[in-house]
Image: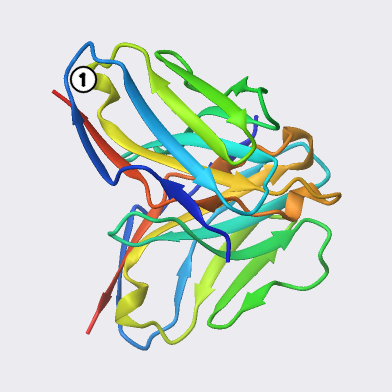
Amino acid sequence: AQKITQTQPGMFVQEKEAVTLDCTYDTSDPSYGLFWYKQPSSGEMIFLIYQGSYDQQNATEGRYSLNFQKARKSANLVISASQLGDSAMYFCAMRPYSSASKIIFGSGTRLSIRP
Amino acid sequence: DVKVTQSSRYLVKRTGEKVFLECVQDMDHENMFWYRQDPGLGLRLIYFSYDVKMKEKGDIPEGYSVSREKKERFSLILESASTNQTSMYLCASSHRGHRESNQPQHFGDGTRLSIL
């Protein structure tokens, strides 16, 4: 079965601290892509970062990095130096190569940044 | 920048009405998707389309239909709205490239639909 699991329904973090959002996945496809999206309270889904299953290095985009551990099937999002504007829902998602464009989403983690 | 536009941010309709949700993208993407989002359930795929006049069922197609007459436009139709279809509806599009797995989906702002 293809599945994304996010075990943290909610997190509180102090401003300027680093935060790690957990994501584990399950797929039998040898090739797949992993994505993280941010959804602020206004509702739009914002693409943050992508990691390919064959990429040798962990993906980074500004303050976002993806801690990819293939053997453990985990793809945790790390946000460095958190800001108040980082408060949002965060979704981990996966596209197995065989899925023909479909993306499977986790249930999300609500991140709240304390001033 | 990719722009995916949904026709309404908020919509209130009555039980039994036929409801149309419209989505337009301006990046010539081949793929378009409709999701619904409910608390604790994440995003669930309703229908998707690879090309004009092409559609495939997602995970929860019951009670919905779709139409894609032009490449840039993908419509979601609630044939006879029911209260359990009250939800947030998100449209997305993506490019179908040679390394398709690295193509993100780009989302619209969502439509919060209430069925009374």
Q: Chain of mark 1?
A: B
Position of A66 relative to A29 (above/below): below
Picture quarter with the N terminus of chain A: top right
Task: Name the residue at 64% across, 34% down.
Answer: A2
Which sits in the foreground, A88 or B108? B108
What residue is pinned by disc 1? B83
Q: Secondary structure at mark 1?
A: helix
Picture quarter with the C terminus of chain A: bottom left
Task: Name the residue at 52% across, 73% down.
Answer: A78
Position of B97 relative to B88 (above/below): below
| Number of numbered tags placed on the structure image | 1
The amino acid sitting under disc 1 is: Thr
Left or right: where A81 falls relative to A68: left
Which sits in the foreground, B45 or B93? B93
Percent from the top left, x then y, of residue B39?
A: 30, 41
Q: Please rate how many residues cluster around mark 1, counting C-alpha atoms within 10 Å: few if below 14, some from 14 to 19, many from 20.
A: some
Task: Name the residue at 38% across, 85% down.
Answer: A17
Percent from the top left, x then y, of residue A72?
A: 68, 55
Q: Is residue B39 visible?
A: no
Position of A17 relative to B66 (above/below): below
Q: Is residue B19 visible?
A: yes
Residue B16 placement: quadrant? top left
Percent from the top left, x then y, of residue B65?
A: 47, 17
The residue positioned farthest toward the front in the image shown: B70
